[in-house]
Amino acid sequence: MSDKASIISLNCLIPGEEVSFDIKISSANQVSILADKIRNRRLDLFKDTDSSKLILYMNKAEADSVVILGLKNDKGAILSGTELMKHENTILSYFNGQPSPKYQGEKGINVIVYSPVVLEENPQDTGL
């Protein structure tokens, strides 16, 4: 375990929703643990989905409003300025410490959570 590991809070957004939710996690954990926490937090949506099937993208560049609007009409859109988070990698490999909002006055969406069903209905290059 790295001595740089710390507990961070990640703001997550599910395409089609307008409000993000936060997940607290150790940066030493693997992305698969984050997916499991997201699934358990949103059982209303993911009770029949194995957490290993959730597809997570790190939001590297986009403003919250751009992310929300970009996904409102196309829940399967893979936005520019995002990066696929591989389940076997650590959180630290994507977030080196607590991420801060990209723009003043925003909460800062860090992770976009795609259901495998949404991406099957809207096939695009997901990088998988």
Image: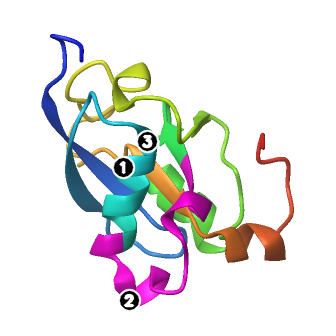
Q: Give the distance between the C-alpha atoms of the residues marked 3 and 2, in whole angstroms.
A: 21 Å
| SS under mark 1 | helix
Left or right: 54 as drawn, with respect to 35: right
- Three-letter amino acid code of the residue under disc 2: Asp
Question: At 26% from the left edge and 30% from the top edge, which residue is drawn?
Answer: 27
Question: At 60% from the left edge and 33% from the top edge, which residue is drawn?
Answer: 81
Q: Is residue 125 above or below residue 13?
A: above
Can residue 24 be seen here? The reply is yes
Quadrant for the C terminus in the image: top right
Magenta-colored stretch includes residue 54: yes
Magenta-colored stretch includes residue 102: no
Q: How many marks?
A: 3
> Disc 1 or 2, which lies upstream in sequence?
1
Magenta segment, which residues?
40-56
Viewer-side residue, 2 vs 120:
2
- Three-letter amino acid code of the residue under disc 1: Ile
Identify residue for label 2.
44
Label number found at residue 83: none
Q: Is residue 16 above or below residue 32?
A: below
Residue 49: x and y in percent read 55, 77
Q: Give the distance between the C-alpha atoms of the residues marked 1 and 2, in whole angstroms.
A: 19 Å
* Label 2 crowd bin: few (<14), some (14–19), many (20+), radius 10 Å: few
Identify residue for label 1.
33
Which quadrant of the figure has residue 19?
Answer: bottom left
Identify residue for label 3.
31
Question: At 49% from the left edge and 39% from the top edge, which residue is drawn?
Answer: 58
Residue 38: x and y in percent read 36, 63
